[in-house]
């Protein structure tokens, strides 16, 4: 299924509203059961990874995710922290990937309670300056069962120049995903991966 417009109802009954997307299908929420635990928000529009919750901010400098009505995509505010400098004054490529993963992932999570990244392909178009105001832009391209494809860009806020672009494949997971992983890891340690 391809989303011609982000206002299109998708196959999990999520709907864009005027300002943002709402997960509005009660049966879907009930089926996942632990939505509150999954969607940790510090304020409307922000969702933090577990390790970032105590500090109340994304360690990669990504914040303020909001729906851009004019552009019809999700927009975020980004600043590369000095700790992620690679070359002189410019960001390490790993940070660029992490920031785009966050921008795309957060956008996809506006449609679905929880996903993980299965694939991320990044084009590094220009060096990304450290400590300069950047913006993230992302949109959903297609839904196919548990697979969600999205595209996103990292831009210089001052000029809107595109510095990096990514396409990603995200997979919708169920609440037991991390429990299965913990079980798998424990088993690997017991058997050394031979079982
Ligand atoms: C509150 C905090 C907020 C926090 C907010 C944070 C927002 C930022 C988001 C960051 C997100 C991350 O970085 S997440 C962390 C990085 N990612 C991971 O750790 C994922 C590790 N990989 C996995 O766990 C697994 O491989 C999964 C879940 C992706 C898939 O395993 P699975 O559940 O068994 O499903 P599986 O059947 O294999 O795949 C389902 C379908 O996807 C396809 N598929 C799977 N992987 C791929 C692939 N790489 N490339 C192409 N296709 C693929 C399969 O062919 C299949 O298609 P078909 O046969 O159905 O057609």
Image: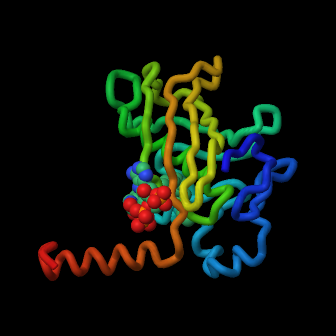
Residue 55 visible here: no
Q: 188 above or below 115? A: below
Foreground: 104 or 1? 1
Question: Which of the 4 quarters of the picture holds residue 22?
Answer: bottom right
Q: Tell which residue pokes out farthest to the front in this image.
A: 1
Q: 157 above or below 20? A: above
Q: Is residue 12 left or right of residue 133?
A: right
* Colour scheme of the picture: rainbow
Question: Which of the 4 quarters of the picture holds residue 194?
Answer: bottom left
Residue 96 visible here: yes
Q: Could you say where residue 63 lies in the image, as x and y percent from the top left? A: 61, 46
The residue depicted at 61 percent of the width and 79 percent of the height is 34
Foreground: 85 or 109? 109
Q: Is residue 25 left or right of residue 36?
A: right
The residue depicted at 57 percent of the width and 32 percent of the height is 153
Which image quadrant shows ligand 1? Answer: bottom left
Instruction: Pick the quarter of the image with the C terminus.
Output: bottom left
């Amino acid at each position: 299924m391809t989303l011609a417009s982000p206002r299109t109802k998708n196959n999990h009954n999520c709907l864009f509203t005027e300002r943002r997307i709402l997960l509005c299908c009660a049966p879907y929420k009930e089926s996942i059961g632990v939505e509150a635990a999954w969607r940790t928000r510090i304020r409307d529009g922000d969702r933090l990874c577990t390790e970032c919750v105590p500090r109340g901010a994304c360690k990669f400098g990504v914040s303020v995710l909001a729906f851009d009505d004019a552009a019809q995509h999700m927009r975020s505010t980004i600043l590369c922290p000095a700790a992620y400098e690679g070359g002189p004054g410019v960001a390490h490529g790993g940070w660029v990937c992490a920031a785009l993963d966050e921008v795309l992932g957060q956008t996809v999570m506006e449609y679905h309670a929880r996903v993980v990244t299965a694939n991320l392909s990044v084009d590094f178009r220009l060096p990304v300056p450290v400590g300069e105001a950047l913006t993230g832009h992302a949109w959903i391209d297609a839904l196919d069962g548990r697979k969600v494809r999205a595209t996103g860009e990292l831009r210089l806020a001052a000029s809107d120049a595109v510095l990096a672009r990514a396409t990603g494949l995200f997979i919708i997971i169920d609440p037991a995903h991390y429990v299965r992983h913990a079980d798998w890891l424990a088993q690997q340690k017991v058997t050394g991966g031979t079982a």
